[in-house]
Every structure is written in structure tokens, then in C-alpha cells.
Image: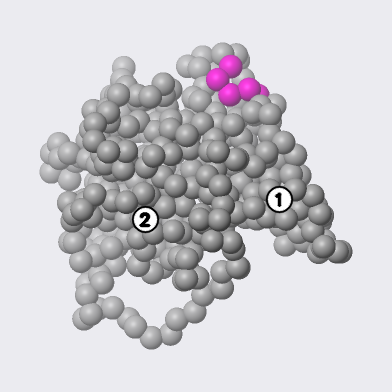
Amino acid sequence: MTTVLPRSGSPVQQLIDSIALDPAAPDTFRSRPAVPLDASAVFGGQIVAQALSAAARTVPREREPHSLHGYFLYRGDPAAPITYRVERLRDGHSFTVRRVVAVQLGRTEQEIFHLTASFKSTSRTVSRPGANHQDPMESAPAPHRLPLAVDEPPAHVHPGVVRRLSEVRDAIDLRYVREPSTPPSGPPSGPPSGPPSGVRTSGSGTVTRVWFRVRELPPGAAAHEPALHHCLVAYLSDLTLLDSGSPCHRTGSPNDGSGSAVSLDHAMWFHRPLSADEWLLYEQRSPSFADGRALIHARIYQADGTLVASVVQEGAIRLGRTPGAVQQAAPLPDDPEIDPFSWAVAKPETD
């Protein structure tokens, strides 16, 4: 998948413009024209971010998103704008809920993505300070001590992920935490052995950790785009997530680029204030892979250890298929036209 970036401004401004929307009608917004960068489908994280932005534009500025739940239905065509229609489900004293339907026009109008997002007031009169707890963040080396992911990607990372990171490297700084090798199951019996990698496997499962941040935001950017930091973190959350559920991460074996994957759904919870242009540690675990479906649980921490967000995604993974190959492929579960949003380019229309 490739992010569709406008060809103007700084790399970070291009990233912001890629999720920005223009009003088209009451509670209706449209993505901006852009030049596809050899894209055959719109990156799923971009659609999630745009849908959240559409919802935020119908909510008072003092209300911030605290959760979102989305389902990918069909591929997003990068050559056509996406229209986001917002339905106002609830405007309560503390909470506001919106439903967003993303639509593209082709031969017929087609809904490609559904999102429900909830917002909570941050004003002192309705906030609920008091009890507070979280799971602690495991220690990790500082990001400045780690190489850029596009320069030294771990061997088990899918080449499609590396290509996507290369396209946005001037806007997004992402670095894999180099984990010492551990046995495939059970607790380590001795000192770690083998070369460092971006994944740790132990009795508690497979853990992939990356540091990421958006490079310096233009002055005043957040003032013009509602929930900009939340939208950017939603975008960032989809960059490496589904790849973390691949069997290569479980075994630690090199990834030869075969196979494809599609995101089926995406959910996020924003627990505390966050900033997309500050370093965030993304801890990703895949507790289950069965029936061709991988489940990934993830947490996002600030550098000081504060848990700011949680993410869950399920995706369908096909093993042994080379991304981009023009060939007839086995149908995905229930829907042969569902679009890959992670490793692979979009399937041919004949699939």
C-alpha cells in the first residue's frame, strides 16, 4: 500500500495534507486531490485518519476522541477522491458519538470504510479526575541510539512495509527496537544469543516494538486541523501493525516478500493526551493466528512511560503469494474483493 501524498510543501506538510479534508456539503467532506505515488490502493491508516478527521469536524473543539472502531469494506482507489459522510449519533453532556461512511464514485457509488468514533469533553466541569492506573512500559533503548527502520530493517519485516516507510521517511521517523534473540517458546534459559532483531519471542508471546514520531510539525498546524495529533497517531498505528502478526515474526525467519495481508478492522482507544511529533513507543503483540486471520494487540507509550493509547486490529494473511503478482488468487474469507491495506498492493480486479 502507498500513501497518496500531495506534491507540494514540506514532507510533513504533505503528510498533513494527505489526511486533510475539504467541506463538500453539510456534514460531508472530501479528500483533497493528490498525485498517486505508484499506488494501487489507498493506505488503510490514511483512510482511518481521514475518517476520524471528518468526525472531528462536526464536534466542538473542546471534545477530543477517546475511541474509534472501523471496518474496511473495499479498496480505496488513489485516483479518485473519497467522500466522508458523517452521521450525528449522540451529542451528550460528556460524550459525542459520530458515524462516518467513506464513499468513492466509480461505475457505481461504493462504501469502502465505516467508522464509529466517540469524543469526550476535556472541560473541567465534566472531566473526572481521580483514580488512575496503567500497565508499565518495559525499558527500551532511547530512539536516537537505534538506526532508522528504512536503513536497517530487521530481516523478518516484510519488504512491502519497508517500501511504505521509505515513501514517508522525510515525514515520519520510525525505528525498530533491537531485541536480543530468545528461544521460540518458554523463558530464556541463559544469556540472549544471536544477532539483535526487531522482535522478541518468549513464553508470553511475540512482541514487536518500534519508536515513531512525526517530524517537526509546521507552526500552528494543530490549530487548523481538528484532532490533528490523534489523526496522525491513527495513521502511524497502521504502519507496522499487521506485519507484526506474520508468521515470520513468530519464528524470526527472514521475510522473502511472499504472501499478502489485508486489514479487516481497526480499533483505537486514546487514554491520555498525546503528541504525534514526540517520540512514542509502539508495543505490538499477536496473541493469535488461526484460520488465516491474525489478531494484534498494541500499546502506545510516551517516552516517560505514560500509556496514551491502545490499538487492536484483525487481518487476513495469505502465505506464499508474491505481492503485486497479476495472478488469480484464492478468495479471502467471505469477500473476494476486500482490499489489502498492509503488505501487498491491491489485488487485480479479476480476483
- Relative to 151, say whether 330 is above or below: above
Tell me the magenta residue range.
321-325
Residue positioned 47% across, 30% down in the render: 1
Q: Pick whichever, 195 or 40, lies toward us.
A: 195
Q: Earlier in the sequence, mark 1 or mark 2?
A: 1
Spot the residue most to the right. Answer: 189
User: 10 Å neighbourhood of mark 1: few (<14), some, or many (≥20)?
Assistant: some
Residue 278, picture quadrant = bottom left
Instruction: Please report the residue visible at 86 percent of the width from the left and 64 percent of the height from the top.
Output: 189
Residue toward you, 214 or 143: 143
2 in the magenta segment: no
- Any mark on residue 296, and which? none
Image location (x, y in percent) of residue 151:
55, 38
Q: Is residue 103 visible?
A: no
Image x and y of residue 342, in percent? 52, 36
Residue 276: mark in rendering: 2
Q: Is residue 300 above or below residue 150?
A: below
In this rendering, position of residue 53 left or right of residue 286: left
| Amino acid at the residue labelled 2 | Ala
Q: Position of residue 303 (x, y in %)?
A: 47, 66
Q: Is residue 299 left or right of residue 231?
A: right
